[in-house]
Amino acid sequence: MSGLSPAQRAAAQARLDAERASTEARIAALGRDFESIVSSSASAADDEHDPEGSSTAFDRQHVAALLGQAREHLTEIARAEQRLGDGSYGRCERCGQPIGPGRLEARPATAVCVGCATRQARRGRGLT
């Protein structure tokens, strides 16, 4: 997918823009959720003896983790926009092969092809 036509570049940028807007909206919603959890637990200073304390701590950590993932996704989107600008968008960063158009449509910020992503996931699970 190297050497994208102007129409392909515009379509890729539109997908990245939509992905950015969606991710920013998710970050805003998660931020509100996090603030709500923190403010509701502020009155219960002793989580250990509060019957809701352990679930409140879990909820706080869960939302914080989701926020971290969403922020990382914004970074991935920015990297994809850089690749779009330098002409490397659509090429796998690991093997250099083209990333399939379907994968780019579904995951516009992806930097790796299906094969490399599969191999990475298998290594992560200790399968290869």
Image: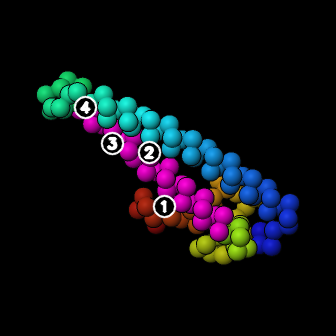
Mark 3 crowdedness (10 Å alpha carbons): few <14, some 14-19, many ≥20: few
Q: Is residue 106 left or right of residue 5?
A: left
4 and 1 marks in contact (CB < 8 Å): no
Taking depth in this image into account, of 44 and 88 the one nearest to the observer is 44
Q: Are marks 1 and 2 in contact (CB under 8 Å)?
A: no
Q: Could you tell me how far apart the alpha carbons at marks 1 and 2 are, in whole angstroms?
A: 23 Å
Mark 3 to mark 1: distance in Å? 27 Å
Q: Which of marks 1 and 2 is nearer the N terminus?
A: 2
- Circles 3 and 1, Cβ within 8 Å, touching? The answer is no
Which residue is at a point 74% across and 58% down the rendered structure image? 13
State which region is magenta.
54-82
Rendered location of residue 72, percent (x, y): 49, 56
Label 4 vs label 2, nearer the camera? 4
Disc with the residue nearer the chain's start (4 vs 1): 4
The mark lying in front, picked from 3 and 1, is: 3
Residue 42: mark:
4
Q: Mark 1 points at which residue?
A: 122
The amino acid pointed to by label 3 is Gln
Of mark 4 and mark 2, the one earlier in the sequence is 4
In the image, residue 37 sits, relative to residue 100, either above or below, namely above
Of the two numbered discs 3 and 1 on the same chain, state the one appearing first in sequence: 3
The nearer-to-camera label among 4 and 1 is 4
Identified at 80% across, 58% down, the residue is 10
| Residue 107 vertical placement versus 58 (above, below) | below
Q: Label 4 sits on what residue type? A: Ala
Instruction: Say which mark, if any, is on residue 61.
Output: 3
Q: What element carries label 4?
A: helix
